[in-house]
Every structure is written in C-alpha cells, then in structure tokens.
Image (spheres, helix red, strand yellow):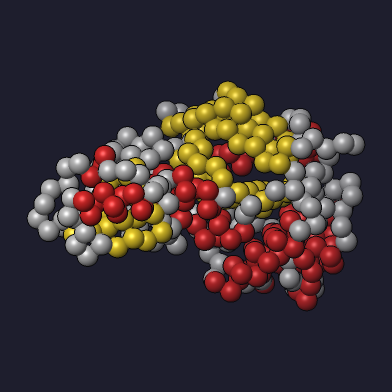
Amino acid sequence: MATPSNAVRLAQVRKKFGAVPALDGLDLTLAAGETLALLGRNGAGKSTAINLLLGLDEPDAGRVELFGGPPHAAVAAGLVGAMLQDARPIPRVTVGELTAFVASTYPLPMRPAEALALAGIAELAARRVDKLSGGQAQRLRFALAVTGNPALIVLDEPTAALDVEARRAFWRSMRGYAARGNTVLFSTHYLEEADENADRVVVVDRGRAVADGTGEQIKQRVGGTLVSFDLAGRGSEGLRSLPGVTAVEIRGDRAVLRTGDSDATVVALAATDRVRRLAVTPASLEDAFLTLTAGTRPQGEGPPSGEPAGGAAAGGAAGSAAPHLEVSR
Ligand SMILES: Nc1ncnc2c1ncn2[C@@H]1O[C@H](COP(=O)(O)OP(=O)(O)OP(=O)(O)O)[C@@H](O)[C@H]1O
C-alpha cells in the first residue's frame, strides 16, 4: 500500500470541554519519517491534540487524519503505537509476557526481545512489571509502543518524572526507532528536549500552533538577538521604532531590545548615545518560547517544571497582545 506523504494532519481542529477551548483551530502536519515535538506549557492543548489524533476523542470541528484516513483506520491497521501519560501496565505479569501479548495484537509485530532491546531493557524480560523502577516502567511503556512495529509512535510527555540519565537513555531509544524511517510525535515542556530530539518543533499555546519550524527557525522568527543596555535614567521612548527592533522589555534601569538586525540596532543606539553597558546576545529557544507564549500564563502560575523561570520575554512578536511586557524575575 502506498503511504501518503503526511503521517499526521490536523486542520483547523477545535475541541471544547464545557466552556474551556482546549483546541482553538489547531493546524498541524507531520510528514512520514519526521520527528516532531509539540511544545507547550501546562494546559496548552497537547494531550487533547494527541487524544484526537489517536481517535480516543472526536473534534468538535476540523479534520484529523492519520496516513490520509480517519485515525481509527490507521490504529486498526497497526500503523500507530502510543505512550500516554496515565497508562499503567497490568501488574503480576512479566515484562516479556506483557510485551509478547501486546505484540500479538498487531498484524506485523517485531519480536518482543527486539522491542525490549530497543527500549534498553532486554535484561528485564523476566522481571514482574510491578517491580520495575519508575524509569524502567517508562521504558517498558516505550517498548510496548514500538513492539507492534508501527509506522508512527505518539509519546505524550514521555520523560516526565525521569532523571537526567534516564532521559538521555530514553531519547537514545526514541532516536533509534526514528532512524528506522518511522514517524515520531512527542509532547514535552522541555525546550532542550524538543530542540535536541525533534526535526521540527510546533509551539502550542491556548489550543493553537503559534510557531512551527526548527528550533533555529523559531529563534529567528521571534528576533534572533537581544541588545541590552543601561538606560541611565533616560526614558524608553523611541526604542521600539529603532531599526530591527521587534520588542522592548524594561527591567529596572536596563532596556532589553529584541532585534532581527543587531548591527542596525546598535548603530542607531550609538547615534542616540545610548550604549552604556551594551550587551549583544543571541536569543535562546527559551527566549523564543517565552515570547511566543507571553502574556497567556494564568495568574499565579509559574513556568512548567524544567523550564527556566527567567529569560527575556518581550511582547510584540507573533501577534502577542502586549507590545511592551514587563517580566518579573
Ligand atoms: N477531559 C477534560 N475535561 C475538562 N477539561 C479538559 C479535559 N481535558 C483537557 N481539558 C482542559 O483543556 C485544556 C488543554 O488541556 P491538555 O491536557 O490538552 O493540555 P496539555 O498541553 O496536554 O497540558 P499538560 O502539559 O499539563 O499535560 C486545559 O485547560 C485542560 O484543563
């Protein structure tokens, strides 16, 4: 069977839970063979999108397709494996038994031992699943997701609650599976994980995709460089209209300008004699993420775990409502 080039397609997908719009016109496509990270803070809509694309729920509006057809058809054909946040393997069976059982429900599975090796837990085949550590259980869930030899695996926050070492090992396994030509979609709060392990990153905010590209492209899109300097008591008027500047943030007496053309910005600043303690630094992916989701975090809610609390968030990019945003540090 010829596989269509898009493994996943969500078009203008909407989903409400009561009055809460979990997805608000989400567009997302994923080419066969690609690894894509869905990046967003808590409540952005990532799990809702994943549930819809696995056919576990229906959208209120819009289209959801896997391999050119409805999700249930792709799932029934064994094309999809998933690792969801709240899945708990049944106790009192061994790792090997459970993997063999799950493999037997797929039309063209890999050998259970191969799935366990891919997940890095070959030596645990005889261990009861309720005796596994958190990290081992997570890797078993990965083995179960791949044992059917699916063309697409969907991983909802697969490294939540893993320590640094377990995370590294997990991503090695994931990349091993992707390197076989498979398609991978994973959700995460962790910017570095998205940047390091995905070909493409889609930033989801309030149920919509607010950025789509490589980590590098996303950084570029929100203004690749930060130019900062001391105001030395002078006001911030006119800074937003300097060449290249896309956003301005004032932190106490210091101004931080996000710019797409740092040379032009610095030359213009020098002409106005505002170069005290001048610093030019590349924007990080954290900066980009905070900018893209600026002003949307519910009051009193801190950054998701693993995200830095700081960063130079500034409004004005990506249609943000706040052109001039103060960020408490
Ligand atoms: N079954 C449900 N009933 C009511 N509200 C829901 C339900 N599922 C999701 N929501 C709401 O929809 C919004 C999106 O939730 P979702 O779980 O998709 O976000 P997420 O990006 O996966 O978040 P997290 O990173 O915390 O898992 C949230 O406001 C959430 O409270």
In this rendered view, identify the residue nearer to me: 294 or 234: 234
Residue 200 appears left or right of 238: right
Residue situated furthest left in the rendering: 233
Task: Residue 93: tell me if it is visible.
Answer: no
Q: Quadrant of the C terminus?
A: bottom left
Q: What residue do we see at 27% from left, 57% from top?
A: 228
In this rendered view, identify the residue nearer to me: 233 or 286: 233
Residue situated furthest top in the rendering: 61
In this rendered view, identify the residue nearer to me: 120 or 123: 120
Residue situated furthest bottom in the rendering: 123
Task: Residue 273: tell me if it is visible.
Answer: yes
Position of 209 relative to 106 (above/below)? above
* Image location (x, y in percent) of residue 157: 57, 54
Residue 219 appears left or right of 1: left
* Image location (x, y in percent) of residue 212: 55, 42
Q: Quarter-wise, where is residue 205 in the image?
A: top left
Q: Quadrant of the N terminus?
A: top right
Residue 328 appears left or right of 55: left
Q: What residue do we see at 84% from left, 65% from top?
A: 114
Q: Quarter-wise, where is residue 51 in the image?
A: top right
* Image location (x, y in percent) of residue 235: 12, 48
Position of 315 relative to 278 (above/below)? above
Q: What residue do we see at 12% from left, 58% from top?
A: 232
* Image location (x, y in percent) of residue 17: 48, 31
Q: What residue do we see at 85% from left, 67% from top?
A: 113
Residue 148 appears left or right of 245: right
